[in-house]
Image (tube, rainbow, N blue to C red):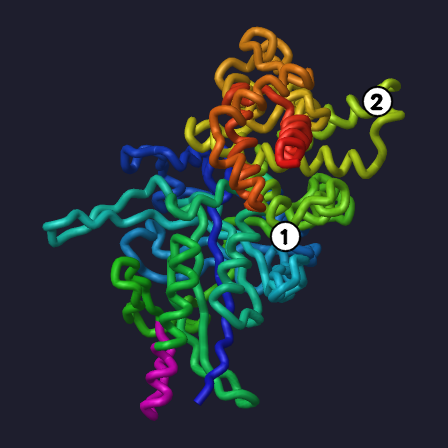
Amino acid sequence: MFYKPTIGLEIHVELKTKSKMFCSCPNNFEEQQPNINVCPICLGHPGTLPVINKEAIHKLLKIGLALHCHVPKHSKFDRKHYFYPDLPKGYQISQYDLPLCKNGYLEIFGKKENDPKRHLEKKVRINRVHMEEDTGRLIHSKGTDYSLVDCNRAGIPLMELVTEPDIDTAKQAQKFAKELQLILRYLDISSADMEKGQMRVEVNISLSEEGKPLGTKVEVKNLNSFKAVEGAIAYEIKRQTNVLEAGEKVIQETRGWVDDKKITVSQRIKEESHDYRYFPEPDLPALHFTKEEIDNIRNEISELPQEKHRRFLLEYDLGNKEAEIFVTNRELGNYFEKTMSELLNWINLEEMKAKIDTEDKLKLAKLCSNYMLSDLQNLIKNSSLSADKLLITPENFAEFTILIYEGKISSKIAKVLLQEMFKTGADPSHIIKEKELIQVTDESEIEKIIQAVIAKNPKPVADFQAGKENALKFLTGQVMAQSKGKAAPDIVAKILKQTLEKNSD
């Protein structure tokens, strides 16, 4: 029997602020020494009073507005009671019935078979985005029968986002989490590094027969990679299907993901909201927002990833794959845009206007994109640099692109030239002159090279004259090799073919 999955996500994100949520302790993700960034407030000592971090509230409202959420005029904090060794106060300051943001959505896109365009795959509704404080962390030493508590993380501003159960597949859940991570980084809300615990995903999943009420919900907690999100959902669908097909009932519980075994394991019976004994936090004031305050935050939101993706398709005529790389790798995307700006300035020079039309502008964009995403990106990867640390200026990369476009250098010379530019940061014209990389366009000089190649390769010449077209490619390669890549390929192709056809008459 087929069981339909219903999936919702709860995502926790540590916000990028200077201090913790309710005290002045540093919010330092990199601190290695335990229990250094602590004080009586975040350790929950009696008689201490928390103070709200305004920057954290501002950042949470910003992400909420970017996700199309409604921001109520009034909000408050609540105490969420539960007992665990890494929770110093014995309760967590969180939000319950009056969250900072609610009723938003995030669209995720996909591609249909045999159609290169992006299509709206799912509009995932967001129930709420609220603020709370993070807990400490437990350190389990191998070979010991005890755990240590590090409270450096306790009290860090923690955003919790809860979706509606709108997600149908593991792949959709993964796409949602990736898109959210990208938005968080674009807005500088959080680094959202899953490996460092700055973004943690929890999955709620149930199975039901088509047309029947939703099944029993199971929660899988603290998934710290996109692969884990997809793997945990896939495993739970299979596990719950087997339980139902055996005539048994799925238990409402919290489970954990065991990454090395690719399975989930039971941790505890799932709590209900009343188990946490929520009540308003008595030590913090209620929050009130004016329309002007909300509008000011909304105006701070810059171009978001999906908007940038659409613009790259329209403005530069890029494919989905190219646009996605530039959007995901923000530094490289910015570098591409700066280079295109230089190219457009070049194009708009009076002497160029008569030569280059709109179609040529798109060809330049495509040429620039191709070299940036292949040769340049390979150089970046091998050097461990990021695009914002390159020695090659956007102006020089634009000049490099123009040289290829105008046929002044061959693709072979372009590779050598780009490597030298990458190492030294020198401008292309200087390197071409210094390394004598200028392309040979003199037809008489090229003809001499061709005659020498023909004389040395009688068999490929005979093969071509016998109708084997591949022989022409081989001979062209020999000519280019003989000229050390300097001969203009179009002139080589023209003269070589003419010469071979003439000799066969």
Asked if the residue under mark 2 is in contact with the one under mark 1, i.e. CB atoms within 8 Å, the reply is: no
Q: Is residue 440 above or below residue 383?
A: above
Query: Residue 84: where, in percent of width, then height?
Result: 30, 58
Q: Quadrant of the C terminus?
A: top right
The residue segment tinted magenta is: 239-253
Image quarter for residue 48? top left
Image quarter for residue 100? bottom right
- From the viewer's perspective, tell me whether residue 295 is left or right of residue 184: right
Q: Is residue 179 above or below residue 187?
A: below
Element type at mark 2: helix
- From the viewer's perspective, tell me whether residue 192 is left or right of residue 211: left
Q: Which residue is mark 1?
A: 64
**Residue at x 58% of width, y 23% of height:** 450
Query: Residue 162: where, in percent of width, then height?
Result: 54, 62
455 and 57: which one is in front? 455
Q: Quadrant of the N terminus?
A: bottom left
Q: Which residue is at the far front?
A: 505
46 and 383: which one is in front? 383
Query: Residue 213: where, in percent of width, then height?
Result: 53, 87
Q: Nearer the viewer, mark 1 or mark 2?
A: 2
- From the viewer's perspective, tell me whether residue 274 is left or right of residue 449: left
Amino acid type of disc 1? Gly
How far apart are the two marked residues, 1 and 2, measured between alpha carbons? Answer: 47 Å
Residue 364 among magenta residues: no
Q: Which residue is mark 2?
A: 352
Image quarter for residue 25? top left
From where the camera sits, is residue 446 visible? yes
| Other-residue count near label 2 (Cα within 10 Å), few / some / many at <14 / 14–19 / ≥20 | few
